[in-house]
């Protein structure tokens, strides 16, 4: 599943102290997930955290065919990747998911067979930051030189930041899929954007050398080398849903599939899918839920001809399970002409 909720469009009466927020919060099983929302100091943080947790519950309930969330147990890796701890869906042997929020949007991506990570990146304006190029100086060491060069190709601050959003969300999505988050090391991941950006001229020389070509040979047969470089990093893409290619520790990783989509409001979201064997889990509980191994190559082969899934924008009422639907609807039937409820 690929779901996105516009957090700014949801304005429950009474905010965190209102009946609607409390009803939705109580849909979460008692324990760390519910208390984690309550403990946050600011209303916006509470709202984003609740929506993210409800997305996780909805995905888990759908995977299991359940009509409520009461029996679901959510765990987290040492790197804070959430996962369904119990019960496990028998027909989805490697079911896992990831959530992200930034700016207007809260998003979830899940997969039944491969590791999945997701990250959404908002504009500087939506983050409350000054619109300038200072982000490049602030992130030295995390944004590699070729990535900085690609960003600087754009003509305006907003265009440059949009390229940064794509690069940054790609790095984050990979680290979140693995389960380590930023502890993985964002500087270990090199991102190459597709389309016009991913020309032969911008591909690192090391990739070509790996395939047996030295710099002197590149000069003697530039056409052949350009074809090799292009094929080495080629990824199917369209203008509406571009893809990216990544290296990890200087190794080209075609087994990591990254897809990107621009959400309304100039937010960019990246979904990263990778081999389950690369899950990082100090506690061992997440890895124990991944029950079918050695299938990554076959899964990628079968999905090769499929179009990447796009995000469905869903409203808050869609996060309410059937058993609580009537109680939720009752809140909205209470007559109060001064209050406009946006779902």
Image: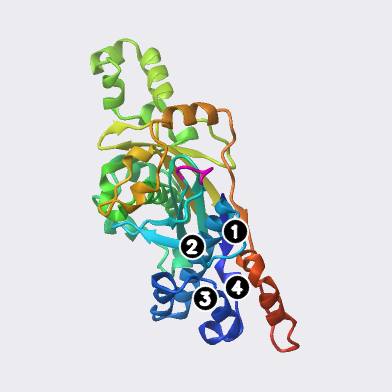
Are circles 1 and 2 on residues that touch, CB within 8 Å?
Answer: yes
The residue lying toward the viewer, choosing from 159 and 320, is 320
In the depicted structure, whether residue 19 falls above or below residue 302? below
The crowd level at tag 3 (other Cα within 10 Å; few <14, some 14-19, many 20+) is many
Quarter where residue 202 is shown? top left
Question: Mark 3 or 4 closer to N-term?
Answer: 4
Q: Could you say which disc has been placed on residue 25 in the image?
A: 3
Residue 199, position in %: x, y?
43, 29
| 2 or 3: mark nearer the eye | 2
What residue would you read off at disc 1? 66
> In the drawing, does residue 264 fall left or right of residue 192?
right
C-alpha gap between disc 3 and disc 4:
14 Å
Residue 263, position in %: x, y?
57, 54
Question: Mark 3 or 1 closer to N-term?
Answer: 3
What residue would you read off at disc 2? 72
Question: Tag 1, which secondary structure?
Answer: loop
Quarter where residue 58 is shown? bottom right
């Amino acid at each position: 599943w690929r779901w996105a909720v516009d957090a700014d469009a949801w304005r429950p009466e009474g905010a965190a102290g209102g009946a609607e927020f409390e009803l939705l919060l109580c849909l979460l099983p008692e324990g760390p997930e519910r208390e984690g929302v309550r403990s946050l100091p600011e209303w916006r943080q509470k709202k984003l955290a609740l929506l993210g947790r409800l997305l996780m519950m909805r995905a888990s309930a759908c995977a299991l065919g359940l009509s409520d969330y009461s029996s679901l147990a959510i765990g987290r890796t040492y790197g804070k990747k959430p996962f369904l701890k119990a019960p496990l869906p028998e027909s989805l042997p490697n079911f896992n998911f990831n959530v992200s929020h930034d700016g207007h949007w809260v998003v979830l991506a899940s997969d039944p067979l491969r590791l999945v990570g997701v990250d959404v990146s908002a504009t500087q304006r939506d983050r409350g930051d000054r619109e300038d190029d200072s982000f490049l100086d602030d992130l030295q060491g995390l944004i590699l030189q070729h990535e900085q060069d690609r960003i600087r190709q754009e003509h305006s601050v907003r265009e440059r930041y949009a390229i940064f959003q794509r690069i940054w969300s790609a790095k984050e999505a990979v680290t979140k899929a693995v389960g380590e988050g930023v502890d993985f090391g964002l500087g270990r991941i090199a991102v190459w954007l597709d389309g016009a950006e991913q020309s032969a001229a911008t591909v690192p020389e090391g990739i070509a050398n790996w395939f047996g070509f030295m710099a002197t040979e590149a000069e003697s047969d530039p056409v052949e080398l350009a074809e090799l470089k292009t094929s080495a990093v080629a990824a199917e893409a369209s203008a509406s849903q571009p893809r990216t290619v990544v290296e990890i520790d200087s190794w080209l990783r075609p087994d990591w599939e990254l897809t990107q989509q621009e959400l309304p409001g100039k937010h960019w979201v990246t979904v990263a899918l990778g081999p389950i064997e690369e899950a990082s889990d100090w506690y061992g509980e997440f890895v124990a839920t991944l029950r079918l191994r050695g299938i990554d190559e076959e899964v990628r082969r079968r999905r090769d001809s499929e179009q990447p899934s796009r995000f469905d924008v869903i409203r808050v009422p869609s996060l309410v399970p059937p058993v609580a639907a009537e109680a939720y609807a009752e809140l909205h039937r209470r007559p109060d002409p001064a209050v406009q409820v946006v779902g």
